[in-house]
Image: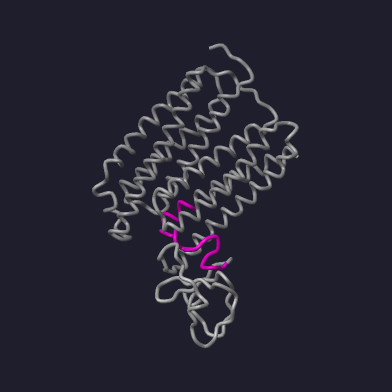
Amino acid sequence: MKIRFRFWVGLSIVLVYGVIAAGAIVRMTGSGMGCPDWPKCFGYLIPPTERAQLDWKATHNYQAGQVIIVAEELRVANNDFRSSDQYNPTNWEHYDQHDYAIFNPVHTWIEFLNRLLGALGGLATLVVGILSFWQWKKSKLIALVAWLIIFGMGFQAWLGKTVVDSNLQPFKITIHMVMALLIVALLLYLYYISKTEKSIKAIPTYIKGFAVLALVLTLVQIAMGTQVRQFVDEQIDLLGEGTQALWLDPAPILFYVHRSFSLLVTGLNIWLFLALRKLQFPTAQMQQVLTLIGLEIATGILMYYFDFPFSSQPLHLLFASLLFGAQSYLIFHLFQPTQSVST
């Protein structure tokens, strides 16, 4: 049971990271409104593949909640009915959450796959919650964290709805991202505390403090990155696709702060690596952290100096979220020692 529990926790971590990666692709491709309603997509469980499916049809069976596009506006069926030869507006309601009524099959299916991954992640965490009851005697904390994650996934789903209903308001997208990182941290913590053995050397308090500071700096860096990304999105709307060379010309001051801030993040984590190695603490996790920082910087360089090559944006975000996870897991090790070492 213990092995099965950790397997499902690990699978949940992979799926949540998959959702983060898919979300980055959604934003890169501008597919956030590919499904303008929630939780369905144009009122369908499986979204349409062509525009004609969203036109009104005579003598056609419609179900409550099904969506059509009339005069460039969304209409929602208010009940189950069969249409007559003429369009009857009394059978339809205006979709009043927003006025976005564009169908792009590529955008629709990218956003649908993003939601599908989210649903699979939710199911995996639900399995974790159910299996956690068998861990109750070993540790009540395991069950409590597992169900906190489930409620967090539910809240994240609701946030996803508010993002769509708001037609992708930037601050709601940022909150959505922060919540995803919080869920990742909780899952990693659950994975750590469900281990069968712990043999960690004691670490001085000041090093723990700097490890926490490094994590906070990463969060600040991610927050600034989301704001820079918002500027880029506005430039895309203003200048259009295919003008990548102009998206950061000129760049906002925050971009230069974001870029320079990476030097502070890198320097602090190199110091942590050297300090932990001096204490003979296993440095494999710090090596992962430094590798991810290097990849993060590399993709940032690609975006700025090589005009946003394909996939550089989602990889930049994915590496940032992986970095946050690696730092979080390192902190769990540092704060739960079981054996002392002279310093």
Residue at point 53%, 50% (across, down): 19
Q: Which region of the structure is painted magenta?
A: 23-44
Residue 123 percent across, percent down from the top left: 64, 51
Q: Main secondary structure of the magenta part?
A: loop
Splitting the image into 4 quarters, where does residue 142 fall? top right
Instruction: Single out the residue that lies furthest toward the left.
Output: 250
Q: Is residue 132 left or right of residue 297?
A: right
Splitting the image into 4 quarters, where does residue 101 fall? bottom left
196 relative to 85, above or below:
above
Residue 25 percent across, percent down from the top left: 46, 54
Which residue is more in the foreground, 289 or 160? Answer: 160
Residue at point 69%, 27% (across, down): 197
119 relative to 98, above or below:
above
* Residue 254 magenta: no
Which residue is more in the foreground, 212 or 40? Answer: 40
Residue 103 percent across, percent down from the top left: 44, 69
Number of disc labels: 0
Instruction: Single out the residue that lies furthest toward the bottom.
Output: 85
* Residue 36 magenta: yes
The way the protein has been coloured in the rendering is: one colour
Q: Is residue 340 left or right of residue 173?
A: right
Q: Is residue 243 left or right of residue 293?
A: left
Instruction: Single out the residue that lies furthest toward the top.
Output: 342
